[in-house]
Amino acid sequence: MSMATRTDMQSPALHVDADSHDLIRVHGARVNNLKDVSIEIPKRRLTVFTGVSGSGKSSLVFDTIAAESQRLINETYSAFVQGFMPTLARPEVDVLEGLTTVITVDQQRMGADPRSTVGTATDANAMLRILFSRLGKPHIGPPSAFAFNVPSVRASGAITVERGAKKAVKATFTRTGGMCTRCEGRGTVSDIDLTQLYDDSKSIAEGAFTIPGWKSDSFWTVRVYAESGLLDPNKPIRKYTKKEMQDFLYREPTKVKVEGVNLTYEGLIPKIQKSFLSKDKEALQPHIRAFVDRAVTFTTCPECDGTRLSEGARSSKIKGISIADACAMQISDLAEWVRGLDEPSVAPLLATLRQTLESFVNIGLGYLSLDRPSGTLSGGEAQRVKMIRHLGSSLTDVTYVFDEPTIGLHPHDIQRMNDLLLRLRDKGNTVLVVEHKPETIAIADHVVDLGPGAGTAGGTVCFEGTVEGLRAGGTITGRHFDDRAALKETVRKPTGTLEIHGATTHNLRDVDVDVPLGVLVVVTGVAGSGKSSLVHGSIPAGEGVVSIDQGAIRGSRRSNPATYTGLLDPIRKAFAKANGVKPALFSANSEGACPNCNGAGVVYTDLAMMAGVATTCEECEGKRFQASVLDHHLGGRDISEVLAMSVTEAEEFFGAGEARTPAAHAILGRLADVGLGYLSLGQPLTTLSGGERQRLKLATHMAEKGGVYVLDEPTAGLHLADVEQLLGLLDRLVDSGKSVIVVEHHQAVMAHADWIIDLGPGAGHDGGRIVFQGTPADLVATRSTLTGEHLAAYVGT
């Protein structure tokens, strides 16, 4: 066949059907609060989804489009493989057509394992290990010899080889790992304060243990010590002999029988280390974290100096640099060092490593180091680290889904992020972005605006079209798109100062600063300039300080705003008092739970590798309570009806009349203050958006007694219209006599401040200095910093 004939066969005219699939079609989406949404999204374009927090953006993009794509991909695997994968239910949607493979880049924090670092999370460490195993002098072994997660192993013994006549052969096995033996690859060692674990004046039988959760009747903890036969449970601990103390604190795991049950007895110190210290502190529940803070002091490992690596791994060097030195470098410096290496034998490896490190710099994370624990990254940093592996990908016709990629970015850095999104689109990919920032909405090819309100008032498409059409449209996003907060004409006078001297946390350069009190202070600067290090490192939460960070709210589908805020306690007590019964009856997680669904409201049927099915419980009809509990009323409503109320309805209900409950009314008032009036009290936390969770946390912390409030990017996840409400809330806090310190990038918050502290001038070792202190008007007038230039452009001066 001639070339001419082949070319003719590939004529576009013959592939009309194949080329017509240029839209993602969604019809009848009903996930969470979506109300039969039907929409067509153009492929190979940048589409931005906007709308107030809770309007249904994430429900449409993540829980419908991305979830169905992932489910369909999983179904291509064999049933055996699917059995090892998470089972995904089909989203509630009538038709989904034109889907492509979805790569989701969300804001979920990265695994907070103590051994997880930026290097291990991005494969940069894996490439460095291979590099040092090939070029390092002296040569100490394979790549595993440079891995702080791999211990060295030695074994010897006899093995039987079944080849012809069986015979035993003596064999030895060795594996060289890079793990520091003292700290086991964690970089820190812990010293435990025994006085925080037990009261030595008491015996075990008298309740000597002061460890959270260790109750006297607990089979697995206290009773295994009391009834092991190794210790006298009635003898005060301070009177133990040397051997008894050794057994009590350090004994190796030993099988014992307690009431005929085989259990393992283990010394108290190793048991505490396994129970509490093997997990990342930030992932622990608040009361457990408080106990660990009291009982345990973490210090840098003296043997490896915090590098996590064995002496052998640290001794092998390339051009005078060890792998520990390389991982401790700022990534922008490390990229420069790798560029200087010219070794033909590892050329492909060097090229890939250079590309990975340069991706960090291009995405605005050049200030990080590879040994930075991944659990310490902010949500925005974690999201950008996840993007690294996709930047150099050769895949095209992929759908990339981003969840507010500009979170945690200074206006100066947002342009970089926009360029990246456009680069992904221009490679022939479909890019879907959930976003609030007007700078990113402005570059969209297509805009979908959801609303008009939040929660039950949202879930419909209010606008679909171009950015110019959005501006001209009458939607809440369109009306607020060009909003600009004006600089204050007069600023408040401080009532005192909080002096910070010699701050050196992370990249801070011996910073001295006086933070004014009694006013609204905004701390700004590019990402990585040292804002959080200054605020959280120098103003720790404690006496008189309420610190609200970006940490995720943890909660199962049984958790809801009523349980999280403590609102359910006064409500249960009010119901119990009105009906003369126990408060526990009015909890779906306790005695009042429907016995058929155990208070979940739905019955889950596990179908092995197929998606499980959730059906509404027939007995309680999804109300989660026993029928007898629903016979008890307060103000004419039963407990399930109260939990179905919105915050606004409940505030009115508990504010007056028979149901008047001041404690509940106060909590509901705080929820309304942060703009969550539309939320229903019993809505599972798992269905809340990121912005809603942030404000729920803010409302909860507002109840704490403190004179200084420290907020870390409270505008994260907030719509342009909601930012105005947040500014009003900050003003009310200051006017009530509080001092408010906000770490923030949003120009509206900067313009509204009484005092600005700007850090920089750059990120990492190029930052860590105070580059401006003063009023927003002075910052705009001098334009002496990057923040000043962007704020001046924002307010239009």
Image (cartoon, rainbow, N blue to C red):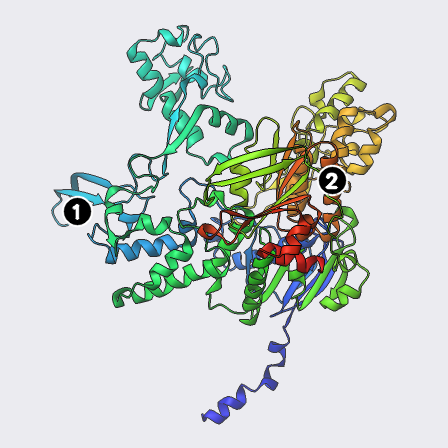
Q: Quadrant of the C terminus?
A: bottom right
Q: Position of residue 370 (x, y in %)?
A: 40, 50
Left or right: where does residue 368 sit relative to residue 316? Answer: right
Residue 731's mark?
Answer: 2
What's under tag 2, amino acid-wise? Asp
| Neighbours of disc 2 within 10 Å: few (<14), some (14-19), many (20+) | some
Residue 461 position, x and y percent, is: 76, 59
Look at label 1 and name its amino acid. Glu
Query: What x and y, as percent, mark residue 25?
Result: 68, 65
**In this image, 145 relative to 625: left or right?**
left
For the residue labelled by badge 2, is the local secondary structure a helix, a strand or a loop? helix
Q: Which residue is mark 1?
A: 162
Tell me residue 89's x, y (percent): 61, 50
In the depicted structure, whether residue 509 falls above or below residue 209: below
**Observer able to see residue 598:** no
Residue at x 77%, y 22% (from the top left corner): 574
**SS at mark 1?**
loop
Viewer-side residue, 153 vs 637: 153
